[in-house]
Image (tube, rainbow, N blue to C red):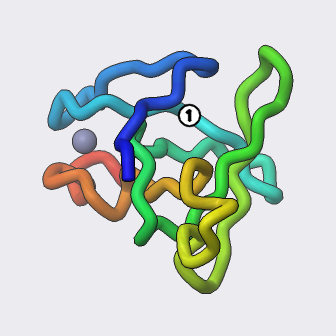
Amino acid sequence: MSKTKIEWTNVTACRSCGAEIFWAITKTSKRMPIDAVPTRDGNVEILRNGDATPWAIVHAEPAGMFDAWAERAHTSHFATCPEADSWRK
Ligand SMILES: [Zn+2]
């Protein structure tokens, strides 16, 4: 499957490792850094929110287990950043 970065939200670089990420808002109104490239193993489903910050729906199972969700399945950058321990609070 293609690994297309999403184009409709502001992609930025992680301050720690330089990876491409974007910010999303969780159900509890927390900002979560998300890896810009979707992955079927990701358990975070990204929902478009117009031009505003997208929503992050965290699932117990990988969101990409369903084909229909594959392009919306991402991983929290907290999980993949090699420097996460230095900036996580
Ligand atoms: Zn990082």
Image location of residue 62, percent across then percent down:
53, 77
Quadrant hosting residue 65: bottom right
Per the image, the residue denoted by label 1 is 23
Please determine whether, in this image, residue 57 is positioned above or below residue 13: below
Taking the spot 56% from the left edge, 34% from the top edge, the residue there is 23
In the image shown, does 79 or 1 lie closer to the viewer? 1
Furthest-bottom residue in this view: 60
Residue 89 in sight in this render:
no
Is ligand 1 closer than 8 angstroms to the Cβ of mark 1? Answer: no
Image location of residue 38, percent across then percent down:
44, 48
In the image shown, does 87 or 19 lie closer to the viewer? 19
Taking the spot 34% from the left edge, 64% from the top edge, the residue there is 79
Please determine whether, in this image, residue 64 is positioned above or below residue 57: below
Taking the spot 66% from the left edge, 48% from the top edge, the residue there is 46
Taking the spot 83% from the left edge, 30% from the top edge, the residue there is 49
Please determine whether, in this image, residue 16 is positioned above or below residue 26: above
Q: Secondary structure at mark 1?
A: strand
Residue 2 in sight in this render:
yes
Please determine whether, in this image, residue 87 is positioned above or below residue 66: above
Position of 60 with respect to 21 (left or right) is right
Position of 83 with respect to 57 (left or right) is left
Image location of residue 25, percent across then percent down:
71, 43
Quadrant hosting residue 28: bottom right
